[in-house]
Image: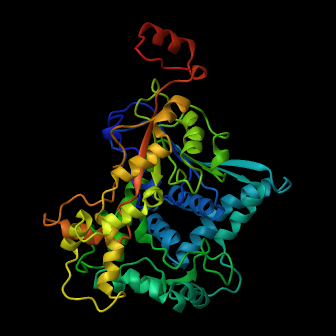
Amino acid sequence: MPAFDVLRLGSNEGNGYGKQLNLLFAASGDLRNVVKTLAEIPSSYNEPVTVTVNDRDFDIVARNAILLLIALVLDDMDEAIDCIIHIWYSALIRRSDLEILQQRIRPLIESVCAKVKGKQSTSILAKTFTFGQRSLRLVLQKSSWDDLLAYMSVPAGLTAEQANRIRVACTLAESRKDYRHRQWLMQSPSHRVAKERFRQDGVLLPFGSSRDEFQEPNPTLYQSIDIWPMKDASDPLSGWSPKDVEDTSSGPATADIYGKLFYFLRGLLRSFILQCSKLHISFRLFHLDFSDLNTHLEPNYFSRIEVSNVSDNGYVGIHRTVAMMAPLLQGPLVNRHATLITLFMNAVDDTMTQRDRLAAMSPQSQPTRRLLKYLPINGPPEGSYDPAIIKMSYARANVGRYDDVFDRFMKKMAFSEIEEFLSMAVKDKHTVIDKWPYQLKLRPGQPGAQEEFDRVLGACLSGTERYVEWRRTKMYREEMDDEAINELVENMIPWDLWR
């Protein structure tokens, strides 16, 4: 899913907010939401920020820690930005990038490993790295501290040529050829060329830039000499707003989509690093299962909690997600704008009935009529596998509207009863991210409508992705000191604010 700003301070607390902000990315994946959020904090905000990042996948935690350390350690901003881009996204990196890992980052980890050498492998150990008014606290098992060192050394014997063969065997596998062609069908001709090139060399650069310097396998990705750890369709473009990337200038090469992404990331990371240098920022990184996280964190503390799609029924589910996160979110007397953000990627598909699907596919249905305005039929199809038919089948979801389907899902999952049991309510009006951020906003025929359709279709966004924002409705009695309770009694409002 594309990154988004989980704060949107101006639309919530206000640009002049004068209190500390505490952000929790409880099932973070990579750092894209962290980077996007911090980069977009208004320049008028000058209070401390605490950013807590957790994931249960150690590969993710290790890479997140390394990228943040690069941002905090290097004094040369341009050097830091390009190093972060390539450590994050490129399969092969420059010698200078590897030297930063081995000479600037590895010694920090080695010093910790030396100090905890005699500890049990399962001991939980924390280390805070301080850089002026910025800090990074990393909480790992002793064995994971030792494992972290491997992410800064290329596996013995692995050359760039071998690394590329391993990767290409996955990204250009003959057995996946049909899947690639179906994906290319959704792209413009120039984007097909760019995407094929990225699958071939895995280096995130403008199309015409030299790859000669990129001769070192990225050790944060290659942990063995015979495995490429990513899926064949993994693509850095999928983590960012397709419109933001498209709107970024790539110079004369106006159709260079990875060049656009490269320059977009350069600008965003510059803003991120500038914010890190200006603000009093404390990062905390955990390697925990989501269900264990609430026992390690402060109650009534976080201004925003973002949980990705663990709330989907196939994962933790909405009831357990809200139950575990509610005590961590700031209550209404602390911050009435505090928000828990949940994502449902599967709820619409899981809730739609066969009758729903058949109705949407009817030639006279509104979705079909709308779809034909974006993808007009120019002649009879050559068969059931005609490219035009396949493209229409993929694009059909993008022209649908799913409010009624999601309403059924919320009723089935008893969203309205969650407030009674957990003192958490769905926000009527979203103030952080749109409910349906990737549904088409323009009507067919409006200026920019075809471009919007092509953009979301090419980005493999279906329009069924649904965010739900939650707020605390009550304070818990144990969260309130005597002064707060007295103030509440003096200014009693019609509903009870604690339980």
Which residue: 40% across, 44% down? 7
Who is closer to the viewer here, 119 or 339?
Answer: 339
Which residue: 20% across, 70% down? 450
* Above-or-below relation of 498 to 246: above
Who is closer to the viewer here, 392 or 216?
Answer: 392
* Above-or-below relation of 97 to 274: below
Instruction: Please provide percent x and percent y for residue 175.
Output: 54, 89
Which residue is most to the top?
490
Q: Is residue 17 left or right of residue 24?
A: left
Instruction: Please provide percent x and percent y for residue 431.
Output: 34, 41
Instruction: Please provide percent x and percent y for residue 230.
Output: 56, 75
* Above-or-below relation of 332 to 159: above
Residue 325 quadrant: top right
Which residue: 51% across, 29% down? 420
Whether residue 6 is visible here, answered yes or no, is no
Which residue is most to the front?
355
Instruction: Please provide percent x and percent y for residue 491.
Output: 41, 10
Residue 336 quadrant: top left
- In the picture, the quarter occupied by the C terminus is top right
Who is closer to the viewer here, 416 or 149?
Answer: 416
- In the picture, the quarter occupied by the N terminus is bottom left
Who is closer to the viewer here, 283 or 181?
Answer: 181
Which residue: 42% across, 59% down? 352
Whether residue 470 is visible here, answered yes or no, is yes
Describe the colour scheme in one phrase.
rainbow
